Amino acid sequence: MGKSLPVLNFPFLGDKLESLQQQISKFISPTSPSAAPNDGRTVDDFKPYLVALNLTKRCNLKCDHCYLDATTKAGGGSDELSTEECFRLIDQIAEVNKGCLLVITGGEPLVRPDILDIARHAVGLGFIVVFGTNGMLINDRMAKTLVEIGVMGVGISIDSLDPDKHDKFRGVPGAFASALAGIEACKRNGLQFQVHFSAQPMNYQELPAVVEWAHTLGARVLNVFFMVCTGRGEELTDITPQQYEEVLGYLVDCQDQYKDMLVRARCAPHFKRLAYEKDPNSPLTKATGYMGGGCLAGTNYARVTPNGELTPCPYMPLSAGNVRETSFVDLWERSDVFNSFRYPQLKGKCGDCEYTDICGGCRARPYVDHGDWLDEDQWCLYTPKGGDKIKVAFNTPEETDIAWDEASALRLSRIPYFLRAMVKKGVERHARETGIAMITVELMEELRKKRFGNDAPVFNFDMRGKD
C-alpha cells in the first residue's frame, strides 16, 4: 500500500535509477512536433473519450483474472484517493473533455462508501457516467438511486452461463445468482445495463450462447474483453492467437444478427481489421469516423488507479504520473508516456501493416511480455500485404450542405464524443440521399429507431449539468 506504480515494470531494469526520459528512450526516439505526420489530426483527436476510474481495491469477490489484484472488501486501501481528491480529479478531466465517458469501477465500486457522491459530482458536470460492477450489490434501492443521480448505466460481468463455473472463477459461491438478481433490479428500475464477458480458454466456446442470452435479457451492449494477463491474471492462460481470431470473426458477424444490441470486442483492436476486411464501409472502424476503433491507450483512453496513478490503460502499469502531484490536464497533454502513443513508431509487422491506423495492435501485450509497448502484437495472425495505409476519418471539420436545427445540433452534442463523427456522417448521408435540407430531432429519432428499435434511446439526452 502507498507505493507508486513503476514507470516501467519488467525484470531487466533491475534497480537502475534512471529518469523517465531515459527509460522511454530505450524503446522510442523522441520526435519534434514538426515530425508528426500531416494526417489531419488535431488536438481534438487526442481528447480522452473514455477514462476508467479504478477508485478502490476493495471487493466482495476474488476473481482469478483481476488486473488490480484486488484485496478483500474489509481490507480497503489507506492510500486511496479521498472524496475531495476524486472531485478535483473529475474537475480536471472536465477541463480536457467534459464530453467523455467516465467508467467508475474498482475493485467493486459499490463497496466504497462515498461512491454515489462521486458519481453525483461527475453527472453534475455533464459527464456520461457508467459503473463497472459485479452486480451483486445492486438491489431495487441501489438501482433507483443510480437512475435518480443520472448514471447512464452499469456493466455487469458474467463469465459463464454455468453458475458453478462462474462462481468458481469469481471465487465466491452464489456470485452468479447475485449478479442475475442485480440485472433484474436494473430492469425493474429502468437502469440500462450491459453484459461484460471475458474470453478465456474455459469459456470462449460459450460465446454464441452468451450473446443470445444477453440479447434475450435485454442488454443494450455486450462487451467481450480479451484479457492481458496481469495482476492475479498473470497465473492464467490466455486463449491462443487462433482462437482469438476465430472469436473476433464471430463478433464481427454478430453485429449483423443483433441489430438492437451493440456487440463489441474490447482490448482487441484486430476486431477493426476484420470488420474492414468484411466491409470497407463498416461503421465499426475509424475509416468511417467511429473514433472508438483500434487501441485507444494513451490517445483517447486512460485509467486512474485507486491511489492516483495515471496509466494508458488498465492492463499497463506504466505510470505517466500521479494526479495527487500533477494535474490530469498536465499529465494528459504533456506526458512523455502518453505522447509516445500518439504518434507511435510501431515496430515489427504492426509498423509495416496497412491497418496500422485503424488497428495498431494491442500495446499492452508486448509491454506485459517484454516491456516494449511499441513492439508488434504477437497475438495477431495477420501478415501485412504492403501498400498504402488505410486512411482514417479524423474528427476534422467537413464541408457540408446539410443544416442542423438548434435542437438537433444540441442532441448531437450529447452523443459520446467517440461516436459523434460517425453519427453526424450517417445522418447527413441519409439526409442527402433523401433530399432533406434540414436535420431535426425527429429525423434523428426516426433513424435511431430504425437502428435500435422502439425502446428508449441508448444515450440519455437529459440537459442536466450540460451547460
Image (cartoon, rainbow, N blue to C red):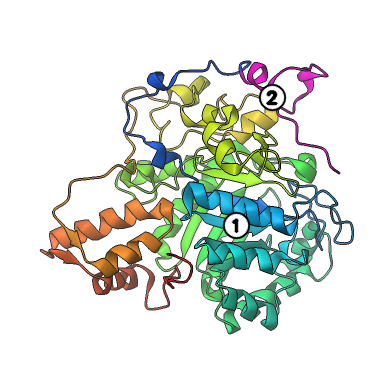
Hey, which quadrant is residue 455 in on the image? bottom left
Of marks 1 and 2, which one's residue comes earlier in the chain? 1
Q: Is residue 425 left or right of residue 355?
A: left
Q: Mark 1 and 2 residues: CB-CB less than 8 Å, in contact?
A: no
Picture coordinates of residue 417 (x, y %)? Answer: 42, 53
Q: Is residue 434 located in the magenta-colored stretch of the structure?
A: no
Q: Which label sits on residue 370?
A: 2
Residue at image location 25% in from the left, 60% down from the top: 427
As helix, strand or loop, the secondary structure at mark 1 comes to strand
Hey, which quadrant is residue 175 in on the image? bottom right
Main SS category, magenta section: loop
As helix, strand or loop, the secondary structure at mark 2 comes to helix
- Give the magenta range: 1-24
Q: Up-down: is 28 above or below 182?
A: above
Residue at image location 71% in from the left, 40% down from the top: 229
Instruction: State which quarter of the image contains the N terminus.
Output: top right
Residue at image location 37% in from the left, 43% down from the top: 286
Q: What residue type is labelled 1?
A: Val
Q: Which label sits on residue 103?
A: 1
Residue 184 showing in the rendered view = no
Please identify, in this view, whether the residue under mark 1 or under mark 2 is nearer the observer.
1
Q: Give the distance between the C-alpha atoms of the residues marked 1 and 2, in whole angstroms.
A: 29 Å
Q: What residue type is labelled 2?
A: His
Picture coordinates of residue 125 (x, y %)? Answer: 52, 62
